[in-house]
Image (tube, grey):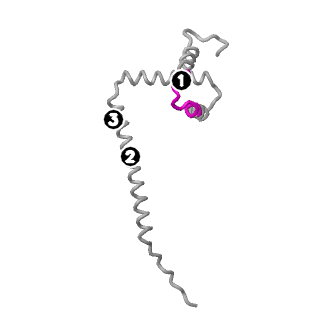
Amino acid sequence: METQAKKRHRRTSEERLADLEEKQRQTEMRLREQLAKFEQQKRSLQENPRARREREAQRRSLMDRISRLVPDWEPAQILAAVAEVRDRVGDNSHLLGELDNRGNALMQELKPRRGRRPRSAI
């Protein structure tokens, strides 16, 4: 029984060129990610600690109010709702103004009450 030697597949110059382009694209993507990470670290070091605390307090307040408004929604549902409104409104300044007014009213309405919570809320 004769054994046939398997022929070696030589890659064409087009295949090698495509591989090099893919490798270059991946390297550039990793470099962009690293640069973005460095920029974020730089911003975080330059940021005033007081401003950072205020921003974190605002973020916590917003998350608390969102959870009061829609307590049974998952984070993915909230994100999808925000994206849907963004797509619907676009750059329409009139609708953006209406959203701003409604958002401010909701922020005031959902503001935490001062004092102790009643027993019925526990």
Q: Residue at x 39, y 57 (%)?
A: 24
Q: Nearer the viewer, mark 1 or mark 3?
A: 1
Q: Quadrant of the N terminus?
A: bottom right
Q: Residue at x 55, y 23 (%)?
A: 99
39 part of magenta stretch:
no
- The residue sitting at the right extreme is 120
Q: Amino acid at mark 1?
A: His
Q: Amino acid at mark 3?
A: Lys
- How far apart marks 2 and 1 lie (CA) works out to 37 Å
Q: Residue at x 33, y 31 (%)?
A: 45
Residue on which disc 3 sits: 42
Q: Earlier in the sequence, mark 2 or mark 3?
A: 2
Secondary structure mainly formed by the magenta segment: helix
For mark 1, give the secondary structure: helix
Magenta region, residue range: 84-98
Circle 2 crowding by C-alpha within 10 Å: few under 14, some 14–19, many from 20: few
Q: Quadrant of the C terminus?
A: top right
96 part of magenta stretch:
yes
Q: Are marks 2 and 3 in contact (CB under 8 Å)?
A: no
User: What label does residue 32 carry, if any?
Assistant: 2
- The residue sitting at the bottom extreme is 1
Judge by depth and name the residue closer to the eye, 24 or 64: 24
Q: Amino acid at mark 2?
A: Arg
